[in-house]
Image (spheres, rainbow, N blue to C red):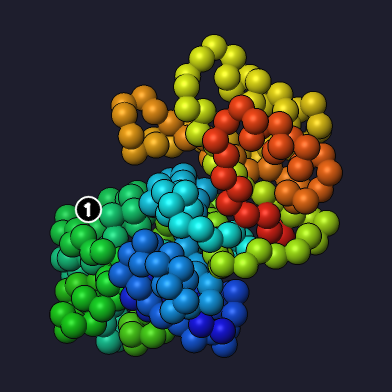
């Protein structure tokens, strides 16, 4: 299977692809938009992108892309996020003076670095894979990088400290997007986006009431900027059930009569 994902190799996106299909032919794209475009232009059968991290929340670019491309979420893949401190070559006694790290990775490992390497220079990178590449190219014994284990393996780095993330319960949910939908499994989740068009008292109450009356369990609701005027928002909603189930279909039909709605996908639940 041809799969597009966010590059370079060695990122958590790469790990998500391998968890989805270990034999996939992978196309590493520069941006999340490029991943969606690759699927839209039939350059890849599916795309795999991050949607939500348990610590830092939703990935706004992914939500934007779901709104703008006519693709469907067909699966979710949850990956544990484990950050490791790695060096080039064998571990030495030389003091580490600089660390390559992605800003989010740095934020999630701040306490460890502050306690163990308080004077280290933080060198920001564009991805966890880029951190590994830059360390490898530096050929410096006084430099390190915070990387996933996969990146260390692919680039021949030596991990000197494992699991340095400050919060050990750190997970990222990735979604698989494709042109074709998937069938019901009996244990599904549905994602939708709703644009109210006009703000008015009781709007959210009435919207949520359609789910409550049918005993549909909401698992997420979030307001995201519509990219229009200030104060204009879209509701991103996830709930248990498949869009073809009778009670879900009834709720969606009623909501569609009052709001602009886009069904982003019904797909098997992983948790």
Q: Residue at x 80, y 61 (%)?
A: 185
Q: Foreground: 147 or 189?
A: 189
Q: Is residue 164 above or below residue 144?
A: above
Q: Is residue 251 visible?
A: yes
How crowded is the residue under tag 1: few (<14 C-alpha within 10 Å), some, or many (20+)? few
Q: Residue at x 45, y 82 (%)?
A: 26
Residue 124 placement: quadrant: bottom left
Residue 217 at x, y percent in the picture: 74, 37
Residue holding disc 1 = 118
Q: Residue furthest top?
A: 201
Q: Foreground: 198 or 48?
A: 198
Left or right of 4? Residue 184 is right
Left or right of 26? Residue 179 is right
Q: Quadrant of the N terminus?
A: bottom right
Marks counted in the figure total 1
Q: Is residue 114 above or below residue 227?
A: below
Q: Quadrant of the C terminus?
A: bottom right
Q: Is residue 4 visible?
A: no
Residue 99 placement: quadrant: bottom left
Element under disc 1: loop
Q: Is residue 41 above or below residue 167?
A: below
Residue 193 at x, y percent in the picture: 55, 41
Q: Residue at x 41, y 60 (%)?
A: 164
Residue 230 at x, y percent in the picture: 31, 26
Left or right of 164? Residue 22 is right
Q: Residue at x 65, y 30 (%)?
A: 257
Residue 202 at x, y percent in the picture: 59, 14
Left or right of 100? Residue 14 is right
């Amino acid at each position: 299977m041809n799969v597009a994902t966010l590059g370079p190799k060695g990122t958590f996106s790469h790990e998500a692809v391998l968890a989805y299909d270990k034999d996939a032919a992978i196309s590493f794209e520069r941006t999340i938009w490029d991943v969606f475009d690759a699927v839209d232009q039939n350059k890849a059968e599916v795309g795999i992108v991050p949607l939500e991290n348990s610590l830092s929340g939703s990935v706004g670019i992914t939500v934007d892309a779901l709104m703008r491309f006519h693709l469907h979420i067909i699966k979710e893949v949850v990956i544990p996020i484990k950050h490791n401190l790695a060096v080039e070559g064998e571990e030495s006694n030389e003091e580490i003076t600089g660390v390559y790290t992605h800003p989010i990775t740095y934020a999630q490992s701040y306490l460890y670095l502050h306690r163990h390497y308080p004077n280290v220079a933080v060198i920001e990178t564009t991805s966890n894979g880029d951190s590994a590449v830059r360390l490898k190219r530096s050929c410096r014994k006084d430099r390190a990088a915070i990387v996933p284990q996969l990146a260390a393996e692919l680039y021949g780095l030596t991990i000197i400290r494992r699991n340095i993330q400050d919060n050990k319960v750190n997970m990222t949910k990735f979604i698989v997007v494709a042109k074709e939908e998937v069938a019901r499994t009996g244990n599904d989740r549905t994602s939708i986006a709703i644009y109210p068009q006009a703000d008015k008292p009781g709007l959210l109450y009435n919207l949520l009431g359609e789910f409550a009356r049918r005993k549909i369990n909401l698992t997420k609701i979030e307001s995201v900027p519509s990219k229009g005027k200030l104060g204009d928002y879209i509701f991103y909603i996830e709930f248990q059930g498949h869009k073809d189930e009778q009670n879900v279909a009834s709720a969606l039909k009623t909501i569609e009569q009052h709001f602009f709605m886009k069904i982003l996908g019904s797909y098997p639940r992983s948790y």
